[in-house]
Image (spheres, coloured by chain):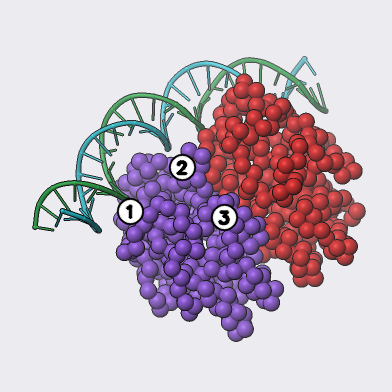
Chain colours: A purple, B red, C cyan, D green
DNA sequence: CGTCAGATTGAGCAGCTTCAACGTATGTGG
DNA sequence: CCACATACGTTGAAGCTGCTCAATCTGACG
């Protein structure tokens, strides 16, 4: 079940059998995180780094007055938390948006993985770089684009990132985000994000529904957002793929609509350790 | 003259003599970039990575309508452009704010440096991580703080980063940024940034002058900005240092006021190669 | 002394916020 | 099966933050 991770890394470099083995082994320790629960919280000093295997997560910071700013989203295959290995203290929190399967790689395991497999290390470093590039694009959005473009741009980004890994069925965007999540990412009020979705709908560009955003014409949306995917640094040949290509790896669909889970969600910030663990693959 | 680079890396790890030698050698190829000139431009496919030895630089993106969003500042000792090694295409530009001395490390040299000195590689990866953390804080600023806090926060960040390396004389902030630069970083109009500086002055927090921002009470400014330096991931013992500590390495003061250079500035996007090169240290 | 980049000021306006209310699914316990 | 609770989406109105436009001021420099 580390399929997406492998697929993402192999977009750029074919891994050897031993490398794959080492990777799969490192990702062996897996947990299920309920929707809306922190994976790691600001101020923690984690001993593990988190990798999203299936689901959706976000990074966020909480301000003094309680407001939340989401700084990025993580989809299946994303190494969300390489920071803690290098930096120790968490300067932000990591939370699951919907119920998600997450691999927790102990820092000693990570160290060994990198030391023994320098190519893998370079690939992960590369991921870090792309992460930074995405962050920069968010800075541009928040600093220079209005709410309408910001929203359209974000939809395009998530679509591009998911498409390249074959996540979702291609018809629209399977995103278990509610409007508050969007508002906190885009940096506007929920009232305003609602109006922006209404505008997108009236323009025929996108329709918001719980758990799914329907987009008939991605080209048109990208044009409206002036979306330029260069910053995602996807491989050339993939960038031209028709929307919705690629088969998802066999496996359960962990989330389809917001909080589509029987697990009760508490606003508590329970750490990873309290979550029931599952065995390795 | 790679003093600041060394100092910055050694905040976290004492380097061995061979490591220092390898580093100094890698930084041997140096150029002087005139104020307001691009070091690398969006769309380029550089063969070298840039390291700021002395001076001030920024990363920025230009929007379709010509507006510029600055996404980060680079000070002496910053590896601004490790991206190009991993990602190839530049998704943003890199420019000198004032006349700056920059080392250009050829990618093959960089590769050898990392391969031969794994600890150096890890340190640089760490730098990348901090870069990302700073980017995240900018996202928070732009998404959730008002212009006043954003400006105060930025001043605190630059001060903290410079102080830890002993850049500047400690009395204020030696920053050759004009108000347009601040506006483009903060994501507001020049008119508004001007009013924010007026407000900071009327509050007795900071006074803008060309090339120098005078701050009498950094504590007060940090309080006003609710500045929390955790995200800079500075070493513990340094974080508590009194302001203005540390002696700058011997060497010329390359910039003190905006465009303090006899070299004429053109808005052209001249690439690195056109700039007169200087010999190694 | 003229020129130019950059700082400053005022006035009117747009984007977005806040507050407050109401609508609508979905779930839950009696 | 109904009454109620909860979470989320939607709507209107008033107000503030920050924008645009446009003019003026200032200091540095040739």
> Is A233 rendered above or below residue A11?
above
Say what secondary structure mark 2 lies in: loop
Name the residue nearer the viewer: A23 or B142: A23
Q: Answer whether residue B37 is visible to the viewer in this image.
A: no
Mark 2 and mark 1: span between their CA atoms? 23 Å
Q: Could you tell me residue B166's position as x and y percent? A: 80, 42
Label 3 residue SS: loop
Q: Which residue is mark 2?
A: A67
Q: Earlier in the sequence, mark 3 or mark 2?
A: 3
- Residue A203 lies, in percent from the top left, at 33, 48
**Residue at horizontal 76%, vertical 65%?**
B119
Q: Quadrant of residue A174?
A: bottom left
Q: CA distance from mark 3 to mark 2?
A: 20 Å
**Pointers 3 and 2 in contact (C-beta within 8 Å):** no
Q: Chain of mark 1?
A: A
Residue name at image x 58 percent, y 65 percent: A48
Q: Chain of mark 3?
A: A
Please tell me the numbered disc located at residue B60.
none
Relative to A266, say whether A30 is above or below. below
Q: Mark 2 vs mark 1: give the one in front.
A: 2
Placement of A65 over or under B106, stated as above or below: above
Question: Which label belongs to residue A44?
Answer: 3
Q: Judge left or right: residue B108 versus residue A244.
A: right
């Amino acid at each position: 079940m580390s399929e997406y991770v492998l697929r993402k890394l192999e977009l750029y470099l074919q891994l050897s059998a031993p490398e794959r083995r080492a990777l799969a082994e490192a990702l062996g320790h897996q947990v299920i995180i309920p929707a809306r629960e922190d994976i790691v919280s600001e101020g923690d000093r984690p001993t593990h780094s988190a990798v999203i295997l299936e689901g959706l997560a976000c990074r966020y910071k909480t301000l003094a007055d309680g407001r939340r700013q989401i700084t990025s989203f993580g989809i299946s295959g994303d190494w969300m938390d390489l920071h803690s290995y290098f930096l120790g203290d968490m300067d932000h929190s990591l939370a699951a948006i919907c119920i998600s399967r997450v691999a927790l790689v102990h820092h000693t395991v990570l160290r060994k993985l990198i030391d023994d497999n320098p190519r893998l290390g370079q690939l992960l470093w590369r991921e870090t770089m792309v992460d930074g590039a995405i962050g920069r694009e968010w800075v541009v959005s928040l600093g220079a684009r209005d709410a309408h473009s910001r929203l359209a741009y974000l939809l395009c980004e998530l679509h591009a990132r998911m498409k390249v890994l074959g996540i979702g069925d291609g018809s629209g965007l399977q995103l278990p985000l509610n409007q508050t999540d969007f508002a906190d990412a885009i940096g506007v009020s929920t009232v305003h994000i609602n109006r922006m979705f209404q505008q997108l709908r009236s323009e025929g560009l996108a329709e918001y529904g719980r758990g799914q955003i329907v987009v008939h014409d991605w080209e048109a949306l990208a044009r409206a957002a002036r979306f330029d995917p260069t910053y995602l640094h996807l491989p050339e040949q993939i960038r031209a793929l028709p929307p919705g290509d690629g088969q998802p790896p066999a496996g359960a669909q962990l989330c389809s609509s917001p909080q589509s889970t029987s697990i009760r969600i508490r606003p508590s910030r329970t750490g990873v350790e309290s979550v029931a663990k599952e065995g390795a693959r």
